[in-house]
Every structure is written in structure tokens, then in C-alpha cells.
Amino acid sequence: MPNFGAIALEPPGLRVIDQTLLPGEERYLLLFTLEQVREAVATLRVRGAPLLGMVGAAAMAIAAETLGSGAAGLREAAERIGNVRPTAVELATGAASAVAWAIEAAPEGPHRTSALWTFAERYFERRVAEDIELGRHGAALLKPG
């Protein structure tokens, strides 16, 4: 996965920039539990729709690592993440999409956990590609100079 600065998968955890310290300081949080992710989102250390979607997806892989990969537990974890900031639709969508895909793609256990990390990586790659394309489109609308 390309590292574009604000976020990176580092299984069994996630590295994300603490946005509350910007622009004066660049510090990264290492998140290894669902509660750490929830705290980072609740305190606005992580914000912005695309980033929150990525965090939601990655949080489900973290949940599988720490809480187990059973379908009921993952669905509950996705709900807990989504409820941290109910108006942050991408957060809940990233988490729910990851869980739904992984339950279909792999049996409970290490294969499902691995599938969740794979989903998160693909989700990240898709979001980055979308953002690059939006930037290209926007740049084409600007006059030179």
C-alpha cells in the first residue's frame, strides 16, 4: 500500500496522523485496539470523510485481531465504530462494508482476519486513486498561473 502521509496500515495496527496537533506538530498515533480507534475518532484526532472511511475499514481488521473474527462480534464492532460519530457517514460505511465483505469472503478465523486487512488495503488504494483523480479534474479547471 502506498503511504501518502496521513495514514498507513501497519498490521496488527494502524498509523494515523494526529490532526489536533497540526500545523504546529506532526505526530502519528499507533492504534492497536478498537478502543484506541474510537478514542482517536471521538477526540477529532482523526477527521475528514475519506480518512474516516479508511479508519473504519482498518478498525474492523484491528477488531478481528483483538476481539476475534466471528460475524456477530464484527458486526457489533462496526456498529460501535459508527456510533462514535454518527454524522460521519464514511466511518460507518467503511466499517460495515469491510465486515460484510469479509463475512462473505472468508470463514471465521485467521482467514477472515487476513481478508479484513486485504479489504482495508484495497479500500485505501481506491480512496487514494479517487482523490488523485479528483485533483486532476480540479486542476484542469484552473487557469494557468
Image (tube, rainbow, N blue to C red):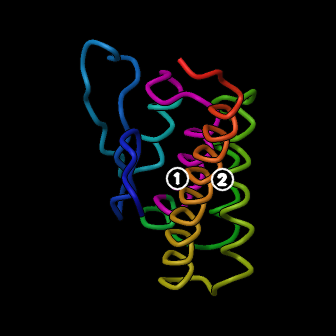
User: What element does badge 1 sit on?
Assistant: helix
Q: Is residue 57 magenta?
A: yes
**Left or right of 57, for residue 27:** left
The x, y position of residue 22, in whole percent, is 34, 17
Residue position for label 1: 59
Magenta span: 42-62
Amino acid type shown at disc 1: Ala
Q: Quadrant of the N terminus?
A: bottom left
Task: Classify residue 131 by image quadrant.
Answer: top right
User: What element does badge 2 sit on?
Assistant: helix
Q: Nearer the viewer, residue 103 or 51?
A: 51
Amino acid type shown at disc 2: Ala
The local crowd at label 2, few if under 14, some if 14 to 19, many if 20 or more residues have their Cα within 10 Å, is many
Residue at left 68%, top 65%? 99
Q: Nearer the viewer, residue 23 or 93?
A: 23
Residue at left 36%, top 41%? 5
Per the picture, the main secondary structure of the magenta-coloured stretch is helix
The x, y position of residue 87, in whole percent, is 75, 27
Q: Is residue 24 magenta?
A: no
Residue position for label 2: 95
